[in-house]
Image: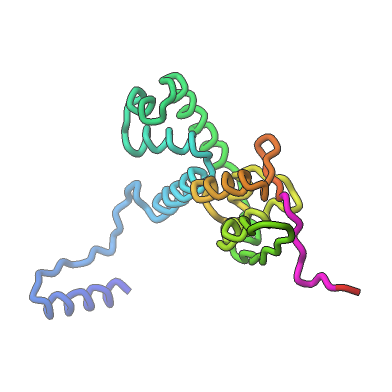
Amino acid sequence: MWSVARNVYKNWCKKKGKYFYELDEQLPENDDSIEVLLEKNTELSLLRRELSLLSEKYRKATVFYYFEGLSVPKISAKMNVSESMVKYLVFKSRKLLKEGMEMDRNYGEQSYNPKSLMLLYWGNGPNNYYDLCKRKIPQNILMACYNDALTVEEISLQTGVPVAYLEDDIVILVENDVLMRKGNRYLTNVVILQKNLHKK
C-alpha cells in the first residue's frame, strides 16, 4: 500500500513540477495518534453538546471567560451582575459541563421527526396566536411539553435544538399563555388533537 501511495505521490509531483519526498513506512509514535485524536474530538463534541444545554446566564459567563478571555470585572460589567456572581456562574457551569459530559444523553424523536401543528382558534376578536405557532420550533416546544412538564434542557434534548435558540420562543409562548411555567418546568396550556382523532 505504501509503495502505491509513494508512486502516486511521485507522479503527482512530477506533473506539478514540485519536489517530492519519500514516504516513510515507519509512523512516528506521538501523542497525536488516531486514538488520541478521536478521543479529543469526542471530548470536544461532548463539551459542545453540554454548552448548548446550559441556560443563558451560565452559557454567557462561560463563553465570556473561557472563549473570549474576559476578566471577571469585565464580565461583571457586561452581564450587569456582581463579580462574586460571575465567579459562581463560571464555577457552577464548569461543574454542570463536567457532569453532563459524563452522562449519556438521548435526543428525542422530534430531533429528527419534527411535528407540524395547525392552530385552530375559537373565540371573539383577532387570532393573536397564529403568528406564535407558524414556525416549527414553537410548534415542537408545545408538542414536547404536551404530556410531560419539561425543563429547558429536556426540551432541548427532545427537539434537538440548542437552548440558546429555544429561550426567546419559550418566553413568548409563556407570555401568551400557550405554555405554562411551573417552577423550572414548562407544560403546554392548549389542547393538541392528533390527526388520527375522528368522530364516531
Instruction: Give me the residue at 63% from left, 56% from top.
Output: 129
Instruction: Give me the residue at 8% from left, 76% from top.
Output: 17
Q: Position of residue 115 (x, y in %)?
A: 64, 65
Asked whether, in this view, residue 90 is left or right of residue 114, the answer is left
Asked whether, in this view, residue 75 is left or right of residue 120, the answer is left
Instruction: Give me the residue at 76% from left, 57% from top.
Output: 191
Q: Position of residue 74 (x, y in %)?
A: 33, 26
Asked whether, in this view, residue 112 is left or right of residue 58, the answer is right
- What's the magenta region? 189-198
Q: Main secondary structure of the magenta part?
A: loop
Q: How many marks?
A: 0
Quadrant containing the C terminus in the rendered view:
bottom right
Instruction: Name which quarter of the figure residue 102 lies in.
Output: top right
Q: Nearer the viewer, residue 19 or 51?
A: 51
Q: Is residue 30 above or below residue 58?
A: below
Q: Nearer the viewer, residue 37 or 121?
A: 121
Instruction: Give me the residue at 52% from left, 44% from top.
Output: 50
What color scheme is it?
rainbow
Q: Position of residue 35 (x, y in %)?
A: 43, 53
Q: Residue furthest right?
A: 200
Quadrant containing the N terminus in the rendered view:
bottom left
Instruction: Name which quarter of the figure residue 19 lies in.
Output: bottom left
Asked whether, in this view, residue 149 is left or right of residue 28, the answer is right
Q: Is residue 60 on the magenta stretch?
A: no
Q: Is residue 190 on the magenta stretch?
A: yes
Q: Nearer the viewer, residue 16 or 62?
A: 62
Instruction: Name which quarter of the figure residue 196 lies in.
Output: bottom right
